Image (spheres, rainbow, N blue to C red):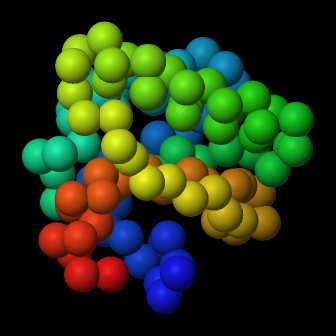
């Protein structure tokens, strides 16, 4: 990887403090779509290890499930990293959009 995920242009940032926020974020991302964007989506999660794992699992599996249900492309790239002192972040983007950005 030649770049850091924080360099990806972000279309929308979601703050997920619990499982419901994670599910709502996933629904919104699928509704907005991945293929027609000029960047990716970011989900900020608290740096509580167990909660971050739950949120990350919910976001990735629900997005995959909802994309399949709506017959959208399910091939996504995502990275999880330490965003700041209080948050982890997941950045999700379509590989086609990532190629267009030349990162």
Depth check: 60 or 19 in front? 60
Is 63 positioned to the left or the right of 83 in the image?
left
Q: Residue at x 62, y 25 (%)?
A: 58
Looking at the image, can residue 41 be seen? no
Most extreme residue toward the bottom, as rendered?
Answer: 2
Residue 72 lies, in percent from the top left, at: 22, 27
Looking at the image, can residue 90 be seen? yes
Q: Which residue is drawn at 55% across and 40% down?
A: 15
Q: In which quarter of the image is the C terminus?
A: bottom left
83, above or below 57, in the image: below
Depth check: 46 or 98 in front? 98
Is 52 positioned to the left or the right of 42 in the image?
right
Most extreme residue toward the top, as rendered?
Answer: 69
Is 27 positioned to the left or the right of 61 in the image?
left
Residue 70 lies, in percent from the top left, at: 23, 15
Q: Which residue is drawn at 25% across and 35% down?
A: 73
58, above or below 47, in the image: above
**Number of marks:** 0
Residue 17 quadrant: top right
Depth check: 93 or 16 in front? 93
Residue 16 quadrant: top right
88, above or below 4, in the image: above
Residue 49 lies, in percent from the top left, at: 87, 44
Most extreme residue toward the left, as rendered?
Answer: 36
Is 41 positioned to the left or the right of 90 in the image?
left
Residue 98 lies, in percent from the top left, at: 28, 66
Q: Residue at x 32, y 24 (%)?
A: 67
90, above or below 6, in the image: above
């Amino acid at each position: 990887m030649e770049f850091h995920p924080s360099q990806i242009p972000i279309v929308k940032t979601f703050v997920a403090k619990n499982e419901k926020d994670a599910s709502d974020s996933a629904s919104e991302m699928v509704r907005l779509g991945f293929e027609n964007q000029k960047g990716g989506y970011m989900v900020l999660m608290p740096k509580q290890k167990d909660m971050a794992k739950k949120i990350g699992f919910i976001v990735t599996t629900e997005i995959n499930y909802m994309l399949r249900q709506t017959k959208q492309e399910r091939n996504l790239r995502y990275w999880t990293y330490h965003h700041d002192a209080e948050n982890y972040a997941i950045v999700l983007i379509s590989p086609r959009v990532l190629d267009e950005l030349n990162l």
